[in-house]
Amino acid sequence: MEKIEKEIKDIPLKIEKEPVLSSEGDGVVYSEATTTPLELVKQKVNLDISSGFAQTTQILTFKNNTNRELEGELNFNLKEGSSVISYGLDVNGQIMEAVPVTKEKAKKVFEEEIADNSKNQVSVVEQVEGNVFKTKIYPINPNGTRTVKLQVLDELDVWKDNMKKLWIPMALAKSLEQLEIKIKINENRMTRVYMREENGELHSLATTKQGEIDVNLEDIKSKLAKTEQGAMAGLFILTVDEKKEKKKVDVCLEGNTKYDYFSATFNMEKESSEKSEISKVGILLDISHSNYNATRDQSMALAKLILEDNVEVVVFPFNNTCIHSKSVKTYEEFEEFVSSFPMDGGSNIENALKAVQVGKADFNYLLLFSDGFFNVGKMPFDLSYQTPIYACPDSESCNTAVLQYMSVKSGGSYFNLHESKTVKEIKSLLGVSTRTFKGLQETPEGLELYPSIPTSLKGQNEFTVYGRIDRSKISENLKVGALFESNNKKTTIPLEFKLLENSKDGDHSVLARIWAQRKISQLQLFGDKFKEDILNVGIEYNMATPGTSLIVLEKLEQYKKHHIRPSHHHPELRAKYDEFVLANENQEKKQFEAKVTLWAKSFKEHRYETWYMKEFKIPKATVKKENSKIMPENPRPGNNNNNNNNNAFNLPTPQPVVRNLTAPPPPPATEAPQLRLMAEQQQQQIRQVEREHMSQEEEERRPRRRRSLKKKCKKSKKMDKCKKKEKKPVPQKPTFKMAAKTFDGNNEYANTIKNAEDQYKAYLGFKPKYHNSPSFYLDAVDVFLSSEKQNLATQVLYNILELGLGDVQLLRIVGYRLDQANKLYESSLVFRKVLTLSPHEPQSYRDLALVLERMGEYKEAADLLYKVIGGKWHNRFEQIQYTAIVELNHIFAMAERNKKPLSWDDYVKELKFDVDMDLRISMAWDTDLTDIDLHVIEPTKEEVYYSHNLSVIGGKISRDFTGGYGPEEYMLKKAMDGSYEVSAKYYANHSKSLTGGTTILLTFFKDYMRENEERQLVTLRMTKNQSKVHVCTVSI
């Protein structure tokens, strides 16, 4: 056994950090910190090992040591093939079980519960991407605790001929006050349980076939005390089959009244394989930011073994672009070349594969060292493959489905360098044709088997398939043949067994969940083709999948409101919900077209007739001439300001400037959050009244303003008569100028990078300290843009995509900047991802629609805005429909102008309006539950903003969005000469997570919806509540 234990120490296992429930940021004036950890104080682990499977249930209690109510987030990675099968949250001292819903619905419900500030409890667990999972909890009371239950199902891995293993990462939190580990073993194999330290040291906890093991915190600490600076890394489970002879096919069967589920393990003789001569190998090396903290120990070790065989290796480093390749023949050359690249930028596998094909080199195979999180360019499902690819991730997190797809599609294999095999074993299988499971000879109706596609055994002599049998179609026996191929020789192994006789209904069995997981794993290999099937499996088997999440709600009213049926674990709650559904099932829903028509009518009454068709008296001498143009102040060489061709990288992002403000006064800093929120809600109601119904005082004041203006005009009549006698000068051609502040770094790194001879080197010098800060990358982007280094700026920008998988705010930041840079295709890919993640938010549709319009994809853009108008949205998004109606008409105008006309027959015709105007400013932002206000000071010195939303000359401000993402608009049908000062005010942030600031996108239009329309974009970042930023001056 000593030899086995020595080998266990050498296995490269994932070392997880302690479980950390966190909330982003650190305070109301935001810092560079990305997460504020909440302490783990209690941890209970129940591990049930039976029939080659392990069911791990963890109950984790976290403490919020802050004085603020928070939303918490727990991120964790699972082993490949593992599934989250149960989740719960403590509600009034009891664990409330979660139920499966679509991923989109879970996100929508969670955000709406926070937005409504209902104080009701809500929690979700979701699969973010690959093997990365996340739970979100709200609320976590000040100085309070929250407890979650997380249940995971694992299959033990085949390790050696008669052994299986399982590694369960489990770091020991320093804040832990109580730890209980209970291990229940019910195996027909001898089972050994070890605790392994980070340095590889092993401590035996038990050796048994049957029985229970109890371990507490003191036991762990006493074992760790025996080694210097010992740190617990996790539990290692090893099962040994002591039988001298194995069955050729070992079947395990479970079932219910509808289906039988089975696993069939085929035990085969060791195969002899001939390895062809390897002369040239290509290595695709991912050097994007997601690998920043990766050690690469295993991938470097594998490369070293390959180079020891005197094989030529060509290295293709890639991030969002493909760096120049290099041929190396020694490990020293390889190590020197690889170490010269910083881990920076996004990840684009499409460019890497193109570089390989351009070289037209004959590689025996390609090695892919990447985590598979490709966030730039086309996904691997849309690419073609000419050379076998062996995908070998060397990181804690990876996108298994994507990497497996590339391997299977190209004729290679997938090996996780942290699981199952050592690098020596993996190296021996590269370029070798190993035994492959080809499927069944014939699949009878009623049998669904996975895997059902050709699958490599990766040198193993044992292979397991999982099946579901429909008892209504197969009633007694199953008899099929399994096909295997090795060295071009095919073998059929019969699979025959009798079905169960007395099955009962109940929760899904372990085998049922494993079967469902294997089905999902296979369907994921085909991209979005089987998205609906994956969704249905997740809901039926109560699993967190790429399409489903598990959600917990506290009260019956929440389940009614969101139309979610409670878990069967809570029968009384479910019965009450079913009564509610039965009583309301005949209630009619409004038709989509009817809703669109209502919004069209509302727009006509409240925007078109009362503002657009109204005549505002402006002195003729001040009316804007039709031939004015956008001319940026102090333009740089090469600056292009033609319609829709503005290179926004030539318009650097201004930095926030804090100013003293007048009305409305900010709430007192000492005010309690609940009282402050009530005040904000009251203020919102007041603003709503002010927007739609002008107060009597306001109505009385406006005529006086106009009379005052008339008096001034009368006094100047005599002067005008004198002027008429004079010879008229030739009128100067008026211009439309937009002067924005240039970048002015105000932190320790910005000016250093800006003034450095080698700016990129200076940026890399600061990256270790700020590598998790979006602000750092945005500031660096501004520096590179101001220095005309657009490609470098783009690479640095893509780092933000790698900071948080599935983080919509980060995705929007990148999407806005790419749009600003005229990288429209790349921007559209980002916004498509946003739409996938947040289809319950109208801003997701609008962002994508506006980019597609600029790309000339008018029909899809119009359809997206049509959904915004007719969709069912949370009330914090109310009146975004007005903006969508204006922009929908703009799309029709652009399509007509570019000879791609659209037909109103496809839409409600009442939406058609002619709303061209001299000046339109639109402002949106990337952070939900945030109140940003648009302010415009007109040439008359009249300031237009939410509580004074209509000026004397007709300047109109749209609805004040106190939650959501905006947009807020300033519209002026006829502009007068002079300067328009544009500012943005960060009024409030109602989010329960402590996010690090908000990025704002402002779009300026001159001659909106006319042939000579001009457009410019500005993005800026605001980091303090109550700050006001002067964005630019528009001069006419």
Image (tube, rainbow, N blue to C red):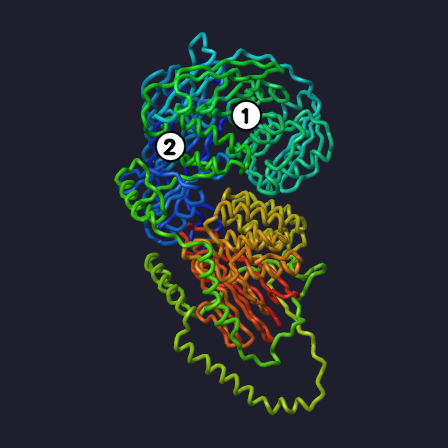
Residue 683: x and y in percent read 38, 65
- Quarter residue 207 falls in: top left
Q: Work out which quarter of the rendered image holds the N terminus and state it.
A: top left
Residue 708: x and y in percent read 50, 84
- Quarter residue 201 falls in: top left
Closer-to-camera residue (418/1016): 1016
Q: Nearer the viewer, mark 1 or mark 2?
A: 1
* Residue where numbered disc 1 is placed: 453
Going by the image, does 733 lie left or right of 960? right
The relative height of residue 852 versus residue 315 in the rendered view (above or below) is below
Mark closest to the chain's N terminus, 1 or 2: 2
Task: Give the farthest residue toward the left.
Answer: 572
At a point 38% along the width and 36% down the height, the residue shown is 174
Q: Which amino acid lies under the numbered mark 1 shown in the image of this protein? A: Ile
Residue 232: x and y in percent read 42, 29
Closer-to-camera residue (74/857): 857
Going by the image, does 989 lie left or right of 743? left
Rounded to the nearest angstrom, the CA distance separating label 1 from label 2 is 29 Å
Closer-to-camera residue (531/922): 531
Residue 131: x and y in percent read 48, 34
Q: Tag 2's secondary structure?
A: strand
Residue 138 visible (yes or no): yes
Going by the image, does 925 lie left or right of 389? left
Q: Work out which quarter of the rendered image holds the C terminus and state it.
A: bottom right
* Residue where numbered disc 2 is placed: 151
The relative height of residue 717 versus residue 872 in the rendered view (above or below) is below
At a point 48% along the width and 53% down the height, the residue shown is 842
Q: Which amino acid lies under the numbered mark 2 shown in the image of this protein? A: Gln
Going by the image, does 887 lie left or right of 210? right
Q: Tag 1's secondary structure?
A: loop
